[in-house]
């Protein structure tokens, strides 16, 4: 029996974890219990020495000292303050008025607001519930196809997992030992392309099945000029002017930023994009303020409304991401700045009160504690797992796959996709990803010759993040589907505007609505695999630190810095049992 346990220790450990999870015990405690139990079993069968767990307390303290994870409560607090201050309602109403006159306009408005909420609130539940409460009744009132309406709302809410600053990207960067700033930069273009893919799908539906996505009737358009005009012409002129300003800035951005930051390399594309959009947004806000202060009458009511509702959160997003991409702030510092900006915006909207502040602080503390406990549990599990050479077992498991590195990618994505149907993305990130990273580091660089290994791993992380997004839409445990079910009409009701009876929204309609968007997300994952340049093209060059030079700088009181904007990940922190990790590869 002892010989059997020793020979099959890693598979038995996986089976033990499954048993603990099936009992309903919280994941964090199930992970820790499995690690401790099998650690003692390993000692009894002679696999480990009696001092196995002596370094475990230091590992736990190392987690609590991890600066990277501080970004999670900051961005969570920022999102809750913005969501509870009524920003989602104003955005949905305003953007709905902009796109309402065209077929599919309400669905496009939901997608764009979902993307904006993703970059501000970063919380799927908040986005889906807000849009379900506000947009779904309007879409049903004006005859939208129910599967299109429900699918658009649930899919748009899940964008919070793919668009920076996403909590998933922070967790993946920490588990993979990479820079959060690089992970944000790599995910920016794929996230925006996914939004464009959603909009393209709605446009196709509007052409093929126009009755499924009707335009907003004239009587429902509330921002009209005194002469009866819609105000869209003024908005288009303002948009064109700001777009030209952004383009002009992009032409001079590289030389100005290089001179300011004293760098020799060309400015990355994601940095140019974010800063150009910041300049455009600030110009629009300035013009709207001047128009109102001087009573010039140059902007329509719609253009003014769009500017004052849309621009402040956009400026906050661009400043947070811009400072991170420029290397002025770390992601943690950017999150702190975003939290302060959210408080100022809530004060400006006269929505900040003690009740709102208490709710935001309480929910932030709950989420941060939840993440910390799962990370501690996964550390205990991986401590025993790695001591038993479990990473070698996983490597051998994937080594014989047909197709080499590409086969590994396909199998991993299938595994993550299937697991996403049953367990939460945090659990996948903390349990599965640490086992896959050592294998990915050995196999994937061969797929992208000439690309730095760190950039290859960022590419792998973005693929996983985009795949994890589907876990909110896939039955039976798609959380976005549950969130919409909780707020969608469960019985027939009389519409307060038209007076007509609206049939209830069925669970089957919600589940069917997610299918098309799951297919779109799978296509996006395949596109990232086929065209890695959309990820690695947005990552700056990684600075290699020479060990002797770093030691000399430390002796002189200097700080040996890595890539600008990068934070040390958990795996790069000092480990009393291993020192400062492996020496740099030359």
Image: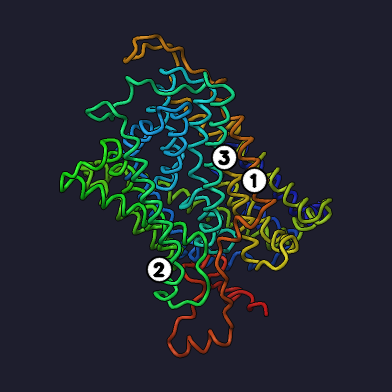
Kindly identify which numbered label has been placed on residue 132.
none
Tag 2 or tag 3, which sits nearer the N-term? 3
Q: Are marks 1 and 3 in contact (CB under 8 Å)?
A: no
Viewed as shown, does residue 414 lie left or right of 158? Answer: right
Q: Nearer the viewer, residue 524 or 245?
A: 245
Q: For the residues carrying marks 3 and 2, which lies nearer the camera in this image?
A: 3
Residue corresponding to mark 1: 525
Residue corresponding to mark 3: 197
Q: Residue 512: x, y in percent?
A: 59, 24
- For residue 391, above or below residue 543: above
Q: Residue 147: x, y in percent?
A: 54, 23
Q: Are marks 3 and 2 in contact (CB under 8 Å)?
A: no
Give the residue at x 71% y 45%. Answer: 15
Q: Nearer the viewer, residue 148 or 406?
A: 148
Q: Residue 204: x, y in percent?
A: 58, 30
Q: Residue 136: x, y in percent?
A: 43, 25
Tag 3 or tag 1, which sits nearer the N-term? 3
Q: Which quarter of the picture shows residue 278?
A: bottom left
Residue corresponding to mark 2: 328
- For residue 430, above or below residue 52: above
């Amino acid at each position: 029996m002892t010989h059997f346990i020793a020979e099959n220790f890693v598979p038995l450990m996986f089976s033990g974890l499954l048993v603990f999870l099936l009992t309903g015990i919280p994941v964090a405690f199930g992970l820790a219990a499995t690690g401790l139990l099998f650690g003692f079993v390993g000692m009894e069968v002679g696999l480990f020495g009696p001092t196995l767990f002596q370094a475990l307390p230091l590992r736990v303290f190392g987690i609590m000292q991890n600066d990277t994870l501080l970004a999670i409560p900051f961005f969570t607090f920022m999102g809750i303050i913005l969501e509870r201050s009524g920003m989602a309602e104003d955005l949905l109403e305003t953007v709905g008025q902009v796109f309402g006159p065209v077929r599919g306009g309400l669905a496009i408005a939901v997608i764009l607001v979902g993307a904006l909420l993703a970059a501000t609130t970063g919380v799927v539940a908040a986005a889906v519930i807000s849009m379900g409460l506000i947009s779904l009744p309007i879409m049903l009132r004006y005859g939208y196809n129910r599967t299109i309406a429900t699918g658009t709302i649930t899919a748009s809410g899940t964008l919070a997992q793919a668009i920076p600053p996403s909590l998933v990207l922070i967790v993946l960067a920490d588990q993979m030992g990479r820079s959060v700033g690089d992970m944000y930069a790599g995910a920016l273009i794929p996230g925006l392309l996914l939004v464009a893919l959603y909009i393209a799908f709605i446009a196709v539906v509007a052409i093929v099945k126009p009755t499924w996505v009707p335009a907003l009737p004239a009587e429902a358009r509330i921002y009209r000029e005194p002469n009866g005009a819609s105000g869209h012409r003024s908005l288009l002129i303002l948009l064109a002017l700001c777009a030209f300003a952004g383009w002009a800035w992009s032409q001079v951005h590289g030389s100005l930023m290089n001179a300011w930051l004293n760098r020799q390399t060309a400015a990355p594309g994601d940095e140019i994009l974010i800063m150009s959009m910041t300049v455009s947004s600030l110009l629009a806000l300035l013009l709207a303020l001047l128009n109102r202060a001087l009573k010039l009458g140059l902007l329509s009511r719609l253009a003014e409304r769009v500017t004052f509702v849309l621009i402040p959160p956009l400026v906050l997003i661009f400043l947070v991401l811009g400072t991170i991409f420029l290397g002025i702030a770390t992601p943690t510092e950017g999150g702190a700045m975003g939290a302060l900006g959210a408080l100022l915006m809530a004060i400006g909207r006269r929505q900040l009160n003690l009740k709102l502040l208490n709710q935001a602080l309480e929910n932030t503390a709950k989420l941060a504690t939840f993440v910390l406990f799962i990370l501690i549990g996964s550390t205990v599990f991986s401590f025993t797992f790695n001591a038993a050479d479990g990473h070698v077992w996983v490597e051998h498991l994937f080594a014989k796959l047909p197709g080499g590195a590409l086969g590994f990618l396909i199998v991993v994505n299938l595994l993550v996709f299937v697991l996403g149907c049953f367990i939460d993305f945090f659990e996948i990130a903390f349990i599965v990803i640490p086992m896959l990273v050592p294998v990915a580091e050995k196999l994937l660089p061969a797929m992208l010759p000439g690309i730095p290994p760190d950039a290859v791993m960022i590419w792998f992380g973005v693929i996983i993040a985009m795949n994890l997004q589907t876990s909110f839409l896939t039955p039976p445990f798609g959380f976005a589907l549950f969130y919409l079910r909780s707020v969608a009409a469960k019985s027939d009701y009389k519409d307060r505007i038209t007076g007509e009876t609206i049939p209830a929204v069925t669970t089957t309609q919600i589940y069917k609505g997610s299918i098309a968007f799951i297919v779109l997300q799978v296509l996006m994952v395949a596109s990232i695999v086929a065209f890695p340049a959309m990820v690695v093209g947005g990552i700056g060059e990684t600075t290699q630190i020479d060990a002797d030079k770093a030691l000399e700088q430390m002796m002189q009181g200097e700080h040996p810095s890595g890539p600008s904007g990068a934070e040390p990940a958990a795996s790069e922190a000092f480990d009393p049992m291993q020192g400062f990790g492996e020496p740099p590869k030359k």
